[in-house]
Image (spheres, rainbow, N blue to C red):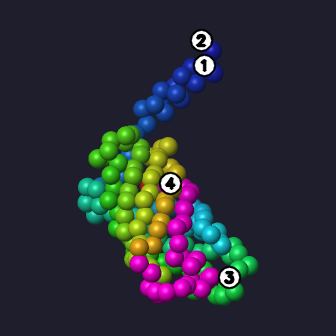
Amino acid sequence: MNKNLILLVLVVLSVSFAHSQAFEGKGDNKFQVGANLQDNGTGLNLSYDFGVGENISVGFSTSYLLSVNDVILDDAFDTRFDLRARFNANLGNVINVDENFDVYPGLSLGLKNFGGHLGARYFFSDGFGVYTEFNAPFAKYKSGTLTASETLHNQFTVNLGAVFNL
């Protein structure tokens, strides 16, 4: 039998036996880095989640807008930056689609608002995967009409990128 064919068979078999899990429960650590997409700006999103129970994690998320639309006149750091404490209900093992897949609805309390998110992660290996999150504000800290710069972190946003097991 050809050496390359044997090597290919061994690689395929080893990959098929690889074990990864999207959320392992208490003590689990996830770090995510990705793009933040929203009206009038795009930027960077970083988040960290720590498992405190079988299906519960807490952590933080931060976004910094690198590109802001010309409509935004206030281009200060505090306009572009947001930091949030977050709480997630990790439901991957509840819905049981695949052990590498996790869905996590959650709540967040940030510098700009109180909101919620719905995210999903899929792991290709034990340490690496992809994620996407949809975020929406539930309560803004300023009522009434918001200026263009105040709407930056007070709107529906989408995050997508890479997730790592730590």
Which residue appears at 44% of the width and 75% of the height? 84
Cβ atoms under marks 3 and 4 closer than 8 Å:
no
Q: Which residue is mark 2?
A: 1
Label 1 residue SS: helix
Q: Tell me, for residue 103, which label it has, or none.
A: none
Whether tag 4 and tag 2 are in contact, CB under 8 A, the answer is no
Q: Nearer the viewer, mark 3 or mark 4?
A: 3
Res. 26 visible in picture: no
Q: Earlier in the sequence, mark 1 or mark 4?
A: 1
Residue type beneath disc 1 = Leu
Question: How busy is the neighbourhood of tag 4: few (under 14 within 10 Å), some, or many (20 plus)?
Answer: many
Is the C-beta separation of discs 1 and 2 under 8 Å? Answer: yes
Find the distance from the CA under tag 2 to the CA under tag 3. 66 Å
Residue at which label 3 appears: 72
Q: State the separation of the CA atoms marked 3 and 1.
A: 59 Å
Q: How many marks on residues?
A: 4
Q: Residues within 10 Å of mark 3 (few under 14, many from 20)?
A: some
Which residue is tagged 1?
5
Amino acid type, residue under disc 2 in the picture: Met
- Mark in front: 2 vs 3: 3
User: What stretch of residues is rendered in magenta?
Assistant: 139-164
Is 106 one of the magenta-colored residues? no
Q: Quadrant of residue 105?
A: bottom left
